[in-house]
Image (cartoon, coloured by chain):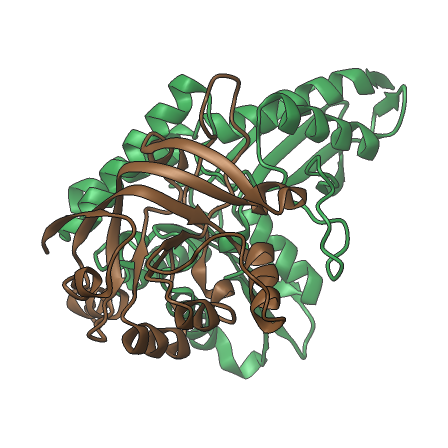
Chain colours: A green, B brown
Amino acid sequence: MREIHIDRIVDAVSKMVQTANFDLGGDVENAFKQALNKEESPTGRDVLNQLLENVEIARTERVPICQDTGFAVFIVELGQDVHIVGGNLNDAINEGVRRGYKEGYLRKSIVGHPLERKNTGDNTPAIIHIELVEGDQLKIHMSAKGGGSENMSFLKMLKPSDGVEGVKDFIIECVKTAGPNPCPPIVVGVGIGGTFEKAAYLAKKSLFREIGKRSKLPEIAELEEELLEKINKLGIGPQGMGGRTTALDVHIEIYPAHIASLPVAVNINCHAGRHKEVIL
Amino acid sequence: MAKVYLTTPVSAEEISKLKAGDQVYISGVIYTARDAAHKRLVELVEQCKELPFDIKDQLIYFVGPTPAKPGKVIGSAGPTTSYRMDKYSPTLLDLGLRGMIGKGGRSQEVKDSMIKNKAVYMAAVGGAGALIAKRIKKAEVIAYEDLGPEAIRKLEVENFPVIVINDVHGNDLYLQGAEKYRKY
């Protein structure tokens, strides 16, 4: 068993929540630049230029790209030969979030009770998904997920007879319904198959993938490309003010399904796709 | 698409000249309020109590900024999605609120209320919080400090850039913009 002390986890998490918010990944920035070349709408181009300028300011001045510094969502790949020492993994991640959001002057956006709605004051608790994997490493993936785009997410239990056409129609309908609300250009995360909660988790997980990276399954990669093209014909455009760039990418993850079910979940990410990963 | 420079407070006459798609640069005082603050403001109106600021001819910015770093006026401060304020906006528009700044679509009820009350809805670029903050010269919490990022702040802005989405004539940039570029 390889031992990993929680202090290392707290430290890594505290740093990654800040970096995620200050330094947008190169995949997203490149996607903005590529979109700028294709964008026909003058307003759309203006918006994309502002987004690029904003990314640069955030990076050099170490200030958040967006004021919604998000719900801190983690997917943790825990090697089964790892022994966490000094405390427990969930507490360590939450302590890292607490520390990072304070040190980085990030916004505290979490209310402790969904109905009573009093802010917890330190952006905890985080959302933590733990996947047990082979090996002796601890891989932490983090996403700062904004509320505006999360609100424009949908799940539907389709019928098997709806088939791939039904899936496509549903995804397109979701993007149309979301319109300008989730801060386009968006990344569309899709989970197909599994159960109700599995589909939602797959959709979320797909958003951790880098922009431009296709599914390893050829038929799914093809579907991603087809949907991206269709979505970018909707005309919604940057910030919904009209244009070619409605989505930067479409990511689809799938899982086996019940003979009776075809669940589809659509989780939308705003253009500020802030995700980081660290391996301990 | 015209370029317009506005100084707050703004009269009904000035606001009526704006058209959907206009680029507007706002200077002067604007007030911040988002979900929780709107709830409290409308509760005050329902109880016939005075609001924490005079709303007539003013603009409300839907934003919850990040905390200011030492020596800075404010943290990142881009717009939040506006439809969550739809339930409350008509009440404030009836009191003379002249405009709102946010991002994303509004309900028909809010659009109708804007036409009736001669008010506009404008969008700032969502997710450009670091850039937008540079146009904010002063920030002061004037109510509901307990709400943290949702407290009401009085901001002094200079050439704060927004685009008119809904004007008093019933135009809607979101609908018209998407229509123009739709390919199927």
Q: Position of residue B30 (x, y in %)?
A: 38, 46
- Residue A101, given in percent of the width and then of the height, sits at 63, 29
Question: Could you tell me which residue is drawn at 14 percent across and 63 percent down?
Answer: B17
Residue A26 falls left or right of residue B170: right
Instruction: Give x and y (percent) for residue B74.
Output: 46, 30
Please say if A77 is above or below A259. above
Q: Residue furthest right?
A: A86
Quadrant the C terminus of chain A occupies? top right
Residue A235 seen: no
Q: In this view of the protein, which residue sits in the foreground, B48 or A22?
A: B48
Q: Relative to the observer, which residue lies in front, A127 or A201?
A: A127
> Which quadrant would the N terminus of chain A be assigned to in this image?
top right
Q: Residue at x 23, y 71 (%)?
A: B168
Residue A149 in view in this figure: yes
Residue found at the far left of this picture: B2
Q: Position of residue A276 (x, y in %)?
A: 55, 30
Q: Is residue A6 left or right of residue A174?
A: right
Left or right of A272 on screen, residue B16: left
- In the displayed structure, B160 sits above or below A59; it is below
Which quadrant of the view contains residue A26?
top left
Q: Is residue B22 above or below residue A164?
A: above
